Amino acid sequence: MLNNDCIFCKIIKGEIPCVKVYEDGKMLVFKDIEPKAKVHLLAVAKDHFKLISEADEARAELIKYMLMKIPQIAENNGCDNGYRLVINQGEDAGQTVFHLHIHILGGEPLEQ
Ligand code: AMP
Ligand code: ZN
């Protein structure tokens, strides 16, 4: 289910543009608008839920599906020498968009 008030749902619906690098029935991957690394992609679930803590069995399967797809997508987009995956959960992590997404950061050596 998508949400009318959510920016990532609007991107999924094509109502807000993005630089898409991969899409299938379950996920969309596009470039982060404010990249924090040379390559900064966002893998977004095609189901509106806010937090990893809201994942039930079906959503956990969706996250697993995304994690299985990400290596090939990352390698195809300049992260062939490694990358970092990040999920921000809640306020202390600085989460700003409350629709489950996985940051893919790479394309250069990352700070520890
Ligand atoms: P988070 O802090 O984990 O919620 O990350 C949200 C990310 O979404 C940030 O890195 C933003 O730069 C990114 N973002 C917000 N709006 C857009 C947009 N319209 N297109 C691409 N990335 C976006
Ligand atoms: Zn959403």
Image (tube, grey):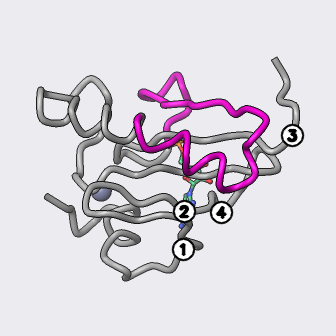
Residue positioned 25% across, 62% down in the render: 25
* Ligand 1 within 8 Å, label 4 CB: yes
On residue 30, the disc is 2
Tell me what residue is drawn at x 49 percent, y 30 percent. 88
Q: Please say whether residue 18 is one of the residues in the magenta stretch.
A: no
Residue tagged 4? 33
Between the residue at mark 2 and the residue at mark 4, the CA separation in whole angstroms equals: 9 Å
Q: Amino acid at mark 2?
A: Phe
Magenta stretch bounds = 68-95
* Ligand 2: quadrant of the figure: bottom left
Q: Is residue 90 left or right of residue 111?
A: left
Residue 56's quadrant in the figure? top left
Q: Which residue is mark 3?
A: 108
**Is residue 71 on the magenta stretch?**
yes
Q: Does the beta carbon at disc 2 come under 8 Å from ligand 1? A: yes
18 relative to 61 in the view: left or right: right
Q: Residues within 10 Å of mark 3 (few under 14, many from 20)?
A: some
Q: Is mark 1 within 8 Å of ligand 1?
A: yes
Q: Residue at 48%, 40% (x, y): give it.
A: 102
Looking at the rendered structure, the kind of residue marked 3 is Glu
Q: CA distance from mark 4 to mark 3?
A: 18 Å
Q: Earlier in the sequence, mark 2 or mark 1?
A: 1
Whether pointer 2 and pointer 1 mark residues with C-beta atoms closer than 8 Å, the reply is: yes
Mark 1 or mark 4, earlier in chain: 1
Decide if ligand 1 comes within 8 Å of the CB at mark 3. no
